[in-house]
Image: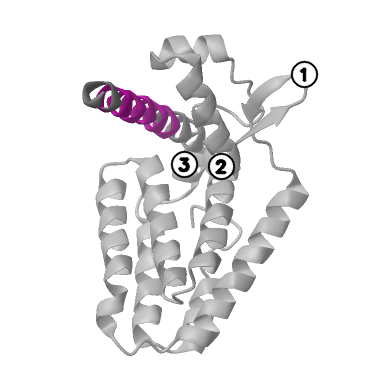
Amino acid sequence: MANAAESAEHGEIESWSLVELAVSRLRRQILSGSIDPGERLVEEQLTRRLGISRAPLREALRLLTQQGLVEHLPRRGVRVAVLSDRDVAELYTVRDVLEQHVVTTVFPIVDPALLAPLQAALDLMRAASAADDRLETANAHRAFHLAMVALAGNRQLTQVYESILVKLQLYMARNLSREAELAEPDDGVRRHERLYEAIHSGDPGTILHELAAHGARSYLS
């Protein structure tokens, strides 16, 4: 009985690892723009490409649906999520409201050590930018803003904010190459360095001013 239980547990762990692998790979492809918004995700093709069975793939797609990255259409299957112009405008509005709430209620920060996650995200951003890894640079941008909002210590607020950032990164994924052509490689790093200095100063007015000048309508700002 013990061996059967251990075998079942091992099978569950193995199956969940396949789910995580599928989520990670599909999420990266979607957020990098390798798979376009609106593109159908065909199970037969994905199982072959990912080397997994239908069960973990379907669970992975369910989790990606929860994250707002894919959507199920009745009788038409699954596709990468599509955001309308109105969706994007509303997401940016909610993002702005949440950031302003955090800035006006949290700062100044008493313990500078609490800013360590922002510094870590900035370091990752510099490394990714130097390596010309646009997706990891965008991920570091998201991590920086998420760390700022997490200073509020409000878990629910942070979860809502993260879901908004992921959806906006999906929206910007198709523009990664265009952004790279129009901006200097380290423009985003310099903007986040200025924002970090404003945050480190602890003055809410200075932080809000820097956020307003940060390029709020371009996620890769």
Residue located at (39% from left, 42% from top): 134
Would residue 165 be seen by someone viewing this image from the given angle? yes
| Residue range corresponding to the magenta coloring | 6-24
Q: Nearer the viewer, residue 133 or 108?
A: 108
CB atoms of marks 1 and 3 within 8 Å? no
Please tell me whether residue 203 is drawn above or below residue 214 in the rendered image. Answer: below
State the SS at label 1. loop
State the SS at label 2. helix
Please tell me whether residue 56 is drawn above or below residue 93 in the rendered image. Answer: above
The circle drawn on residue 75 is: 1
The magenta stretch spans residue 22: yes
Camera-near label (1 vs 3) is 1
The magenta stretch spans residue 157: no
In percent of width and height, residue 215 lies at 54, 63
According to the image, label 3 marks what residue? 181
- Name, please, the residue furthest toward the front: 1
Whole-Å distance between the Cαs marked 3 and 2?
Answer: 19 Å
According to the image, label 2 marks what residue? 170
Please tell me whether residue 13 is drawn above or below residue 101 in the rendered image. Answer: above
Residue located at (41% from left, 73% from top): 195
